[in-house]
Image (cartoon, rainbow, N blue to C red):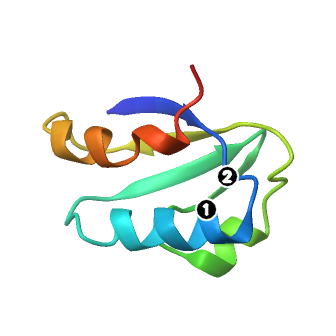
Amino acid sequence: MKAITIKLSLAENVKSFVNVVNRYPYDMDLRAGRHVVDAKSILGIFSLDLSKPITLEVYNDDCAALLEEIKPFMVA
């Protein structure tokens, strides 16, 4: 499993993010504090507090292509 901190501050960012992660077959979750939602669920993402960075948990170690595509959302 890999954990990456991301920021999704705008609705357009959420839509773009969901479009990217839905192209990959493995499971992914977003964690904000104690709340966990499916990273492929746009409604689930909007239920989180998006004013702060959130953690993307990818349940696959071979996810280099995904990490490259979500670079615009990663927190440095």
Q: Identify whether 57 is placed above or below 25.
A: above
* Picture quadrant of residue 20: bottom left
Neighbour tally class for label 2: few under 14, some 14-19, many 20 plus, Cα within 10 Å: many
* Circle 2: residue type: Leu
Foreground of the two, 16 or 62:
16
**Which residue does the image show at 86% across and 47% down from the upper left?**
51
Identify the amino acid type marked 1. Asn
The quadrant of the image that shows the N terminus is top left
Q: Are marks 1 and 2 in contact (CB under 8 Å)?
A: yes
| Residue 72 image position (x, y, % from top left) | 48, 42
Residue 9 on image: x %, y %: 75, 53
Q: Give the quarter of the figure containing the C terminus.
A: top right
User: Image quadrant of residue 54?
Assistant: top right
State left or right for residue 73 relative to residue 9: left
Q: Earlier in the sequence, mark 1 or mark 2?
A: 2
From this viewpoint, which residue is outermost toward the top? 76
Give the label on residue 13, or none. Answer: 1
| Residue 67 percent coordinates (x, y) | 30, 39
Q: Which residue is mark 2?
A: 8
How far apart are the two marked residues, 1 and 2, measured between alpha carbons?
A: 6 Å
